[in-house]
Amino acid sequence: MVNYLYIHVPFCIAKCHYCDFYSVPVENAGPDATGKYVRTLLKEMKLREGSAGNLKTVYLGGGTPTLLSGSQVADILSGAREIFALVPRAEISIEANPGTVSEAQLAAFRESGVNRISIGVQSLADHELCVLGRRHKVKDAFAAFRAARSAGFDNISLDLIYGIPGQSMDAWENTVSSALDLSPEHVSAYELTPEESTPLQVELAEGVYALPDELLVTEMYYAVIEKMKKYGYLHYEISNFAKPAYECAHNLNYWNRGEYLGIGAGAHSYFDGKRSGTLRDLARYVESIEGGTVPVDEEVNITEQDEFKEMIFLGLRKIEGIDLRLMPESGKLLTNKAVDDLIHHGLIEIKDQYLRLTAKGLVLSTEVMVRILNQP
Ligand code: SF4
């Protein structure tokens, strides 16, 4: 039985310059677009009845789920409770963007059962937010945090980005310090990766902006690790830090290759040995659900070889690493020459039956994973 539910909300105020998540500007989505979408999500849940149950987590992601009203989120969660059932104390997260939230709305989310909020702060420097094409200002991020606390959220995560064009080490350290002054329970710190064909990628290609040099970006990563540790946060995944007991259960399930059901336009699922995604097209998604069919537009059977790959790509993201006792093909790793070489170069280690990246290996994680997988 699938115990993890993801709900995609594909609306944003406008597209940020580096992003290729599926979302459309809410203003262009037609009259009552969010209301219509929520009603469609409830229908999809009904169509998916039996595919998930006793939910341990529900994650409203996007897009910008905080473009939904308190009563719309309450309707979605009532539907999830009724159709799938939630375990007591289930983790219910919502992603929020500064500038799109009010205290009354956040209080309504709390009232409906949302108990974790992840705020897309990204940077605490206005000119960097401008380069990223974010619509909010630094003051909106602080206001969103204060509103979330006042609304009763005691599990708040902040998303930060480093490696922004023009960003200096001082500016990054200032963003991290100012974020930590708020004492959030969780912080995600991602390196900026401008996706293909996004405006920022075009601007980089045209030389309008340049990314900071690799060495500086590496130093930024080590700086945030050091700072978070100093403040008592547990570094539990390549890009994620939590106060003890505040790790994100929903995301841990992804890294553990657990099954999950994703609903909504452009949502992904993994269960019954298949990874699948629904149509990244709002109008066609709504039309298909109205007609009684979930519009699955990609479905891949996961072979044993894929499983092995995923274990490396997802499992090594966790700082604790991969529990070799739970890995049916662990023998493949122990006789892998690349693993020997990587251990020799201090990039990975095997300790207490766990294979994990070392501090040196963390920054080269993708290269390390690729080397392990390319070795027969
Ligand atoms: S980064 Fe977030 S807010 Fe910006 S366009 Fe992408 S999903 Fe929307």
Image: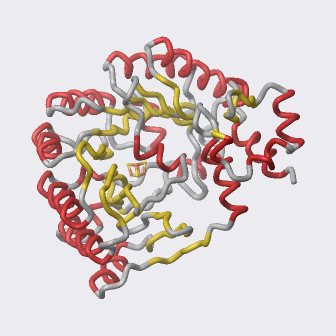
* Residue at (69, 63) in percent of width and height: 304
Q: What is the x, y in percent for residue 313?
A: 65, 48
* Residue at (29, 39) in percent of width and height: 117
* Residue at (46, 63) in percent of width and height: 268
Q: What is the x, y in percent for residue 103?
A: 13, 37
Residue toward you, 249 or 130: 249
* Residue at (60, 42) in percent of width and height: 208
Q: Residue lying at the far bottom in this picture: please name it.
A: 291
Q: Number of numbered discs present?
A: 0
Q: Residue lying at the far front in this picture: please name it.
A: 325
Q: Establish if 188 lies above or below 179.
A: below
Residue 73, by quadrant, is bottom left
Residue 281 appears left or right of 213: left
- The quadrant of the image that shows the N terminus is bottom left
Q: Residue lying at the far top in this picture: please name it.
A: 230
Q: What is the x, y in percent for residue 308?
A: 70, 55
Q: Establish if 179 lies above or below 212.
A: above
Q: What is the x, y in percent for residue 336?
A: 85, 44
Residue 124 appears left or right of 75: right
- The quadrant of the image that shows the C terminus is bottom right
Residue toward you, 135 or 286: 286
Residue toward you, 16 or 344: 344
- Which colour style is shown? secondary structure
Residue 276 appears left or right of 206: left
